[in-house]
Image (cartoon, helix red, strand yellow):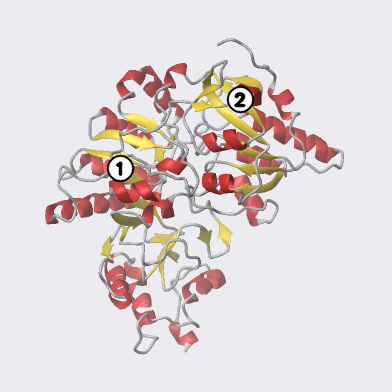
Amino acid sequence: MQQTYKFVTAEEAASYVNNGDIIGFSGFTPAGCPKEVPTAIAKRAEAFHAEGKEFKVGMYTGASTGDSLDGALARANAILFRTPYQSNKDLRSALNDERAPYFDMHLSSIAPHLRFGFMPKPKFAIIEVCDITADGELVLTTGVGISPTICNLADHIIVELNHNHPKELRGFHDIFEPLDPPHRLPMTLLTPSDRMGSTVVKVDPKKILCVVETWRDDEVGGFTPTDEVTDKIGQNVANFLASEIKSGRIPEEFLPIQSGVGNIANAVMASLGTNPDIPTFEMYTEVIQDSVIELLRNGKIKFASGCSLTITTPILKELYKDLEFFRDKLVLRPQEMSNSPELARRLGLITINTALEADIFGNVNSTHVMGSKMMNGIGGSADFTRSAYISIFTTPSTAKKGNISAIVPMVSHVDQNEHSVNIIITEHGVADLRGKSPIQRAEEIIENCVDPAYQQILRDYLALSGPCHTPTDLHACFGMHTEFMKTGSMLGTNWENYK
């Protein structure tokens, strides 16, 4: 590389950012996120605040980020607004205390909405790369997110050149940005391994304000180990899909899998990997986790397309040692591609996502605790769910040592409605909601998915309404929630109080 760019410290790069500026960041989850410059911006904010001056920035990201980005800026009280998804505890506290304005978005929507001008244009794009050329080719690292769009829209690009990621990652990315309507053409992928874009993000070199060299690992924390409950959920998912193959409702060669993030997703992947009735399969998903890497190594997964390699540092380092083995088995794309409803429908994805709670009619809450406190955000679950071949939601049947039922009369916040949710699976069993009326769905869910301690409570709720299409008692539908808020447990819910 000819050093035609200005190499600076993170502090100098941060000095270009001022109060009210809007920044787009690379990455998707902590994978591929810049680390040094956001931390320096947070310190700049703290210095301004110490002088009694205002300093806050608007933030666009691909999804959640690492603590050096979301955590540092939240703790510095430096967030003017934030979208579209987060999972940092300090940021979560800030947005639930109304200290950091936050708006949730479908992850497939943020890049086009930025291009359409629905939200303020970013002044800066801060991008992590493993290589940069003199003519403006940026080779991204482990996460793509909205990088192509923010690089195109931003006035200035600040590059973090992270030497902990090898330059040989060139070739692992499929970078494509569609034209906007009315000029948009179809995305032409027919299989998860097809490509239609470039291996790099190409930018005008004149827009690159400066380059900061770093040697930082991704801040991907280890997921909670699977346990008896999550293992059973994983087995129930695998057995259900195996039965669908046997019945002919899923083709015998199987279909691509999309899977969410976390310990349940890892348990599901492990069960798919060990179930002898599940054939070798491909993935078309957002997040590629540790469990997927293992299944690629042993041949159970033959190809995985995602937006990020959200894998722990030891696993990532092992992958880098054997990079050529994975070169024809992995691709990373912008989330406008990885989460495209068009591609989800065409590829026939089997989608597996996690619910915070579901109600007896099949509506799912993915985001809010007790209806008001944001957990993380909707992420990409709705991008996939509405367009899935089969949409599955998993959840443990209870939380808080059995004091909360994950299945309630009415969800306290709706993210996925009953018309998009085909299957609900807990450790107790599978509720197949396809082709069933609301009352039939309620009976199916209560019988197969609800913890035994709550089954009669929910059956009694159904009896509160007279003859109707969807049994809903407006006085009682949140009775289990209010009982928990009063007593710390839903187990004491008494419908006599609502008659």
> Along the horizontal axis of the image, is 48 left or right of 428?
right
Q: Residue at x 85, y 42 (%)?
A: 53
Q: Residue at x 65, y 40 (%)?
A: 122
Instruction: Say which quarter of the image contains residue 127.
Output: top right
> Along the horizontal axis of the image, is 72 left or right of 56?
left
- Where is 186 relative to 428, above or below? above
Instruction: Classify mark 2: residues with Cα within 10 Å, few (<14), some (14-19) or many (20+).
Output: many
Residue extending farthest front: 183
Q: Position of residue 239 (x, y in %)?
A: 20, 52
Please, what is the three-letter code of the amino acid marked with disc 2? Answer: Val
Q: Is residue 208 visible?
A: no
Instruction: Say which quarter of the image contains residue 22.
Output: top right
Please, what is the three-letter code of the amino acid marked with disc 1? Answer: Met
- The residue that label 2 is drawn on is 159
Q: What distance separates the C-alpha of mark 1 from that of mark 2? A: 35 Å
Q: Position of residue 187 (x, y in %)?
A: 38, 42
- For the residues labelled 1 and 2, say whether their Cβ atoms are less than 8 Å apart: no
- The residue that label 1 is drawn on is 269
Q: Position of residue 144 (x, y in %)?
A: 48, 34
